[in-house]
């Protein structure tokens, strides 16, 4: 991997088994599938357990975050993430529904895509609209980072000083702004 490499941050999650594999095994296998000549894993967070949203809607999630170094463009990396999700039986039937594997591109070298206005439009959507609409294009940084303890807690495990390229706050600063009860729900997964 030479030349134009970028650091990208990816959030991982899942709450449904794939065949006999529990979600944490699926996440581990997805990380192995991600590693390639053009995507090098640099840092992996601990795995965390997070209650399903809304409460009682399904099994708890397992969440993690990873920093990679890549020569892929943001769009090519997203396509790779979608290919890996498909390998692990990801079906996109319900927005924010239960899933075997979710790989979200959080940041790609600080890029703001499609542009500042496009990012602002998606970041400012009311919750009800977010639950119904999915963007038809790549939005970076991920427009919901600042709202999600299940992303920020693992992200702070590996990159607490990462600076949001639009909000100009660190991951640790964004996490500190969330309600303490939301943060407390994201707990390290105990490995037997």
Image: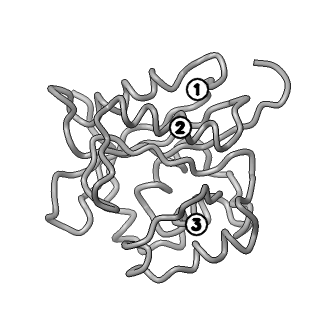
Q: Earlier in the sequence, mark 2 or mark 1?
A: 1
Total marks in image: 3
Residue 12 is marked as none
Q: Nearer the viewer, residue 83 or 14?
A: 83
Q: Earlier in the sequence, mark 1 or mark 3?
A: 1
Measure the alpha-carbon separation of dots 2 and 1.
7 Å
Packing grade of label 1 (10 A; few <14, some 14-19, many >=20) is some
What is the x, y in percent for residue 169?
Answer: 69, 66
What is the x, y in percent for residue 51?
Answer: 24, 58
Packing grade of label 2 (10 A; few <14, some 14-19, many >=20) is many
* Apparent side of residue 39 relative to residue 177 in the rendered image (left or right): right
Disc 1 to disc 3: CB gap under 8 Å: no
Q: Which residue is mark 3?
A: 174
Q: Which residue is mark 2?
A: 66
Q: Earlier in the sequence, mark 2 or mark 3?
A: 2
Q: Is residue 125 above or below residue 186?
A: below
Q: Which residue is mark 1?
A: 41
Disc 2 to disc 1: CB gap under 8 Å: yes
Q: Nearer the viewer, residue 68 or 90?
A: 90
What is the x, y in percent for residue 56?
Answer: 14, 64
**Circle 2 or circle 3, nearest the eye:** 2
- Give the residue drawn at x 28%, y 35%: 89
- Give the residue drawn at x 50%, y 56%: 152
**Circle 1 or circle 3, nearest the eye:** 1
């Amino acid at each position: 991997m030479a030349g134009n490499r970028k650091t990208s941050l990816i959030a991982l999650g899942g709450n449904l088994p794939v065949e006999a594999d529990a979600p944490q095994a699926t996440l581990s296998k997805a990380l192995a599938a991600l590693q390639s000549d053009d995507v090098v894993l640099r840092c992996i967070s601990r795995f965390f357990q997070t209650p399903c949203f809304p409460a009682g809607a399904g099994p708890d999630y397992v969440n993690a975050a990873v920093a990679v170094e890549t020569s892929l463009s943001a769009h090519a990396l997203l396509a790779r993430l979608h290919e890996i999700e498909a390998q692990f039986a990801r079906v996109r039937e319900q927005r924010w529904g239960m899933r075997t594997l979710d790989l979200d591109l959080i940041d790609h070298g600080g890029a703001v895509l499609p542009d500042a206005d496009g990012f602002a439009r998606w970041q400012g959507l009311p919750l009800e609209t977010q639950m119904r609409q999915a963007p038809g294009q790549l939005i970076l940084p991920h427009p919901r980072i600042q709202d999600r303890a299940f992303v920020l807690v693992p992200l702070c495990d590996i990159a607490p000083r990462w600076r949001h390229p639009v909000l100009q706050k660190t991951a640790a600063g964004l996490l500190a702004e969330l309600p303490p009860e939301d943060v407390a729900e994201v707990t390290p997964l105990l490995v037997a």
